[in-house]
Every structure is written in structure tokens, then in C-alpha cells.
Image: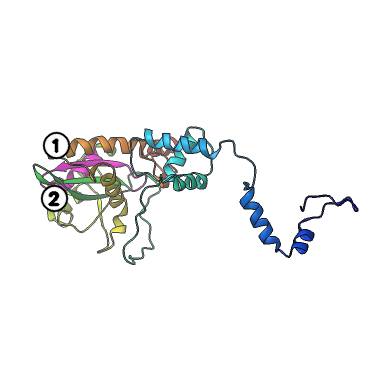
Amino acid sequence: MSAAVSISTNRVYGVQRVCAVWGVARSTFYSAQAEVEPSRRGPVPAICDEELHAMIEDDLERSPFTGEGHRMVWARLRVSGVRVSRRRVLRIMREHGLLSPRRVRQGAGVSHDGTITTDAPDLMWGTDGTRVMTADEGMCWIFTAVDHFNCEVVGRHVCKRGDRFAALQPVAQGLLKHFGGVEAEAGRGLSLRMDNGTQYISDHFRNQVRFWGVEASYAFIEQPQTNGVAERFFRTLKEQIIYGRIYRTVAEVREAVDTFVDLYNDQWLPEKNGFMSPSATREAWYARDPEGVAA
């Protein structure tokens, strides 16, 4: 009716006049129109929601990981040439139930004002250990060392007995790979972040780290976020290959961890890396700074 043309004036009646005659608020009129003729603001996107939904499902099906959020999906779509808004990917994944279950923080938590990231590789590593149950051989230990710069796992060790010697293994692997050896002062300039577990406060562990020239940096008591890089990797590892699976022997756990760590370093896309894998982030840094000296 508002678009109809008056015979006497040859002009449209308009929404304001029609609503005044009907005694209806204009907001009610516009709300009714939106329900009858829904429209999208802005330009029409190049890819409709149905096509984008199919692309998202295809990406999740082809991904070797599980429980991924919308940021990783959006990053892989961009790499493949699909330029869409991250919020749009979030909306479609939420509407179709494709988001991973939300993890709610328990308790108030402890405020942490500092930062544990670094501006270059091999300045600080975080190390930690966790236990996994096997069906035939009982509990086993997984130890890792993770670079705080790019979240790269520089060493890992799976064993039955999680003592101080086992805890040193991933650190030694990282020194061999990134510092060229495990002789005296081989790791000078490196800081090692760890918690206050019995393995890490033992005399043997502390003396060995000191022999390598590595500075020991202990996390604050009851503040696991100060060793957050290693802790976050363990959460990812458990979500991907531990939870919901049964391993019969320590050897099976070791094989699964080795396979996942290689895949993680090569294909995992942390947001802090600009959605680049740990290996690609290291390569990009050294390509920019071949001598390993920050600009």
C-alpha cells in the first residue's frame, strides 16, 4: 500500500502516511516486512552460504585433526583461495553444529600479567611430562620440549618410568637438532621453562641443564599458565590422539606420539604464528634473518 501511487497527486502514499492512517508504528511495519521479505545487507557475496557450508564440511573431513575451531578452518580456506570473513565461517559452523565443544574455565583462575612468548626461535623452551594409561603395561610417561617462539616440538620421549633421566631426553634431542650437540655449554643462550615436579628439581636434572649452559626458569607455584606453552601442547596432544582411544602397550603410545608430533610440526596452524605451521614459521624467520640475529 505504501508504494501505491495516489491518483490525485500522482505521488506514492509513503510509509509514514499509511502507518498514520492505520494507527501502526513504523517499527512494526518494518519488522513485518523483514519477516516477509528477509534481505541481506551489503553486496551479495561471491560464495553463497550453501556453497561455503559444503566447503567447510569438506575441509573438516579432509583434515587429519579433530575438534578444530573456526579459525583453523578459515585459515585453510584462505590458503586454498577462498576469501571469506572469519565471522561468517564462525556463523555457518555454529548454525550447523560444526564447532568443537566449548571448554568452560572452572573457578576464578589466577591473573597473569606477564608474557612467555619470544621474538626468535631457541630462546626459551618449555618442557613438561604427562602420564597415559595403557591396557597391558599400566601407566607410561610422555615428556616433550616445546619452543615458546613457534610452538614447535623440539623433542619428545615416551617411556615406562618417568624419572629425571627420562625428563632430560626431549631437551637433549632439541639441543642435538637445533644447537648441534650436547657437549658442555652447547645450549648457552637458551632458557628452559618447567614446573616444580620432582624430576625437574632433582640435583641430576639441574646439574645437567647447567652443564649444557641452559638457564633454568621455573614456573610459579600453582600457576600452570606460566608454563603454558608446554601445557597447551599436551592439551592438544590428548585431544587429538589420547582421549577416546585405547593403547595396549607403551610402544603403541610411542608410535602414536611420534606420528602426531611430526604431523603437528608440519601442519598444525597456531593462531599466534599467523596460522602458519611451527616448521614454516621457523623457516620464515631464518629466511628473513639467515644469521639468526633478530633485526
CA distance for labels 2 and 1: 20 Å
Rendered position, 226 above or below 53: below
Lateral position of residue 98 relative to residue 5, left or right:
left
Q: Which SS class for mark 1?
A: helix
Look at mark 2 in the image and give the residue it sits on.
164
Q: Which SS class for mark 2?
A: helix
* Amino acid under disc 1: Ala
Residue 42 screen position, x and y as percent: 64, 46
What's the coloring here? rainbow
Rendered position, 128 above or below 183: below
- Foreground residue among 284 and 276: 276
Look at mark 1 in the image and give the residue it sits on.
251
Lateral position of residue 3 relative to residue 108, left or right:
right
Rendered position, 40 above or below 28: above
Asked whether residue 151 is drawn in magenta, I would say yes
Asked whether residue 172 is drawn in magenta, I would say yes
Residue 130 screen position, x and y as percent: 20, 50
- Foreground residue among 277 and 127: 277
Identify the magenta region.
148-176
Residue at figure coordinates x 51%, y 37% from the top left: 50
Residue 37 makes an appearance in the image = yes
- Direction bottom: furthest residue: 108
- Foreground residue among 205 and 195: 195
* Amino acid under disc 2: Arg
Q: Earlier in the sequence, mark 2 or mark 1?
A: 2
Mark 2, Cα crowd under 10 Å, few <14 / some 14-19 / many 20+, is: some
